Image: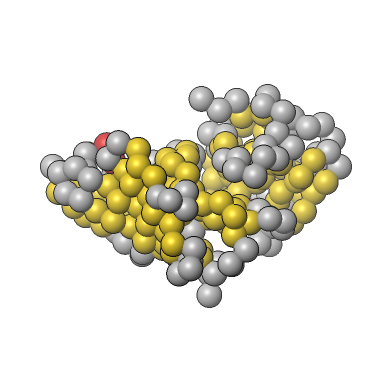
């Protein structure tokens, strides 16, 4: 079993739709959590950190459930420019430190 | 924009050649990483470093080697390139604070013919 697992995707949604991505992690010692975005043939970039209380940044909302070891990302009012692969990332103390999930690809269609 | 640089951006080279992919960052980060990623596939960690003179192998077995003689510099070397090494190589760095994000370079797209 992978340490970080994500919805396999791809997600094809129309503009304006709301879409939610799920991520689960297996290491209960994980400390910090992030969502990264990777455009085709580009490097990953931080989209947002995920806090225990949940956090929102414009159309994006991230939630963390430590008891269930589950992270989610909600995108409201999808734009064409949201098309990308979304990577769930877990940071743990020691070892390789950052663990990337396999990613979920989103295509927002006109 | 992150201050992390990779050269070359694109490299096409013949089998058996020795190559070094350069990665430098000007953020003073202690931690640096090398990832390998094939098109449309997930990132695989191949090497990482927690500071000068520290290097570790990642999850994915790799025939490459790395060195960390200076904080800002983390080059990756392939002694004898093979077609199976064709991939994108991404360098990243992060600070030692507990909530630090990783900053990625633009990547080197390597093709071995």
Residue B80 position, x and y percent, is 73, 50
User: Is residue B28 or residue A53 the one in the foreground?
Assistant: A53
- Figure coloring: secondary structure
Residue at image x 67%, y 27%?
Answer: B27
Q: Is residue A8 above or below residue B74?
A: below
User: Is residue B100 or residue B79 the one in the foreground?
Assistant: B100
Residue at image x 83%, y 46%?
Answer: B54
Residue at image x 30%, y 36%?
Answer: A58
Which residue is situated farthest in the bottom direction here?
A1
Residue at image x 37%, y 57%?
Answer: A72
Q: Is residue A49 above or below residue A94?
A: above
Left or right for B8, reference A63: right
User: Is residue B85 or residue B48 the one in the foreground?
Assistant: B48
Residue A50 position, x and y percent, is 46, 48
Q: Is residue B113 visible?
A: no
Q: Is residue A44 visible?
A: yes
């Amino acid at each position: 079993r992978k340490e970080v697992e994500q919805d396999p995707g791809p997600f094809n949604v129309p503009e304006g739709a709301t879409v939610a991505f799920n991520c689960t992690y297996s290491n209960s010692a994980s400390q910090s959590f992030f969502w990264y975005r990777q455009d085709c043939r580009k490097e990953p970039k931080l989209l947002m950190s995920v806090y225990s209380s949940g956090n929102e940044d414009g159309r994006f909302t991230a939630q963390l459930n430590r008891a269930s070891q589950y992270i989610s990302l909600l995108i409201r009012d999808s734009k064409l420019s949201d098309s990308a692969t979304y990577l769930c990332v877990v940071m743990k103390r020691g070892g390789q430190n950052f663990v990337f999930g396999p990613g979920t690809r989103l295509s927002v269609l006109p | 924009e992150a201050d992390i640089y990779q050269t070359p951006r694109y490299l096409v080279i013949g089998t058996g050649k020795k190559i070094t992919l350069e990665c430098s960052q000007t953020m003073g980060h202690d931690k640096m990483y090398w990832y390998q990623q094939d098109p449309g596939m997930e990132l695989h960690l191949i090497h990482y470093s927690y500071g000068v003179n520290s290097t570790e192998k990642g999850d994915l077995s790799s025939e490459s080697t790395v060195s960390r003689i200076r904080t800002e510099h983390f080059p990756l070397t392939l002694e004898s390139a093979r077609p199976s090494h064709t991939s994108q190589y991404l360098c990243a760095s992060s600070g030692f604070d507990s909530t630090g994000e990783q900053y990625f370079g633009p990547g080197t797209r390597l093709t071995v013919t």
